[in-house]
Image (cartoon, grey):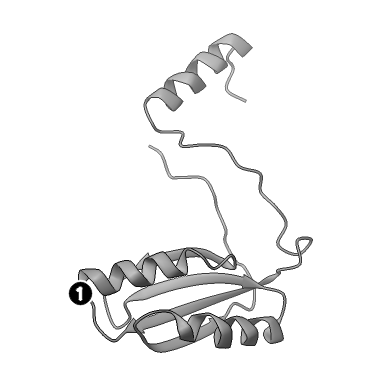
Amino acid sequence: RVNLSESASLRRVRALEEAGLIEGYTALLSQLKAGCPVNVFINITLERQDETDLRRFEDAVRKIPEVMECYLMTGDYDYLVRVVVADTADFERLHSKHLTRLPGVARVHSSFALRTVQKSRELPIR
């Protein structure tokens, strides 16, 4: 509760939207009920890291529906990708049909999440 009237709350939300702090709205779906309960975190190394290769990889990874997040990283790997799948057989299909065929991929290292410990969608706004 924010202890504001409905009109004051709406004005505050509109101001946050106009300021660009609120980027949009979305429904939070249950991964389990949607049939994709398994989270897999994938470290990907590219053969080369020039701007053209990065762009080609990023354009291709955006087209894979199972990809929930993809980050360009520092460190030992070039990208960290989170995908959601139904089970290990589904991941094997995704791995062989899509991940290893992404442009410029040299290595793929995958880790399956056993359990979600913390999953927040709230930003630590101070």
The one nearer the camera, 72 or 9, is: 72
In percent of width and height, residue 93 lies at 64, 85
Residue located at (71% from left, 68% from top): 36
Find the residue positioned furthest to the left: 50
Find the residue positioned furthest to the right: 33
Q: Is residue 46 left or right of residue 61?
A: left
Residue located at (48% from left, 20% from top): 14
Q: Quadrant of the C terminus?
A: top left
- Which of the 4 quarters of the picture holds residue 3? top right
In percent of width and height, residue 89 lies at 70, 86
The one nearer the camera, 80 or 48, is: 48
Give the crowd class for mark 1: few <14, some 14-19, many >=20 residues within 10 Å: few
- Which of the 4 quarters of the picture holds residue 124? top left
Q: Is residue 10 left or right of residue 124?
A: right
In percent of width and height, residue 74 lies at 26, 73
Residue located at (66% from left, 44% from top): 27
The amino acid marked with disc number 1 is: Asp
Q: Is residue 101 above or below residue 116?
A: below
Q: How many numbered tags mark residues here?
A: 1
Q: Is residue 19 above or below residue 101?
A: above
Q: Quadrant of the N terminus?
A: top right
Q: Which residue matches tag 1? A: 50
Q: Is residue 44 above or below residue 63?
A: below
In percent of width and height, residue 123 lies at 45, 45
Q: Secondary structure at mark 1?
A: loop
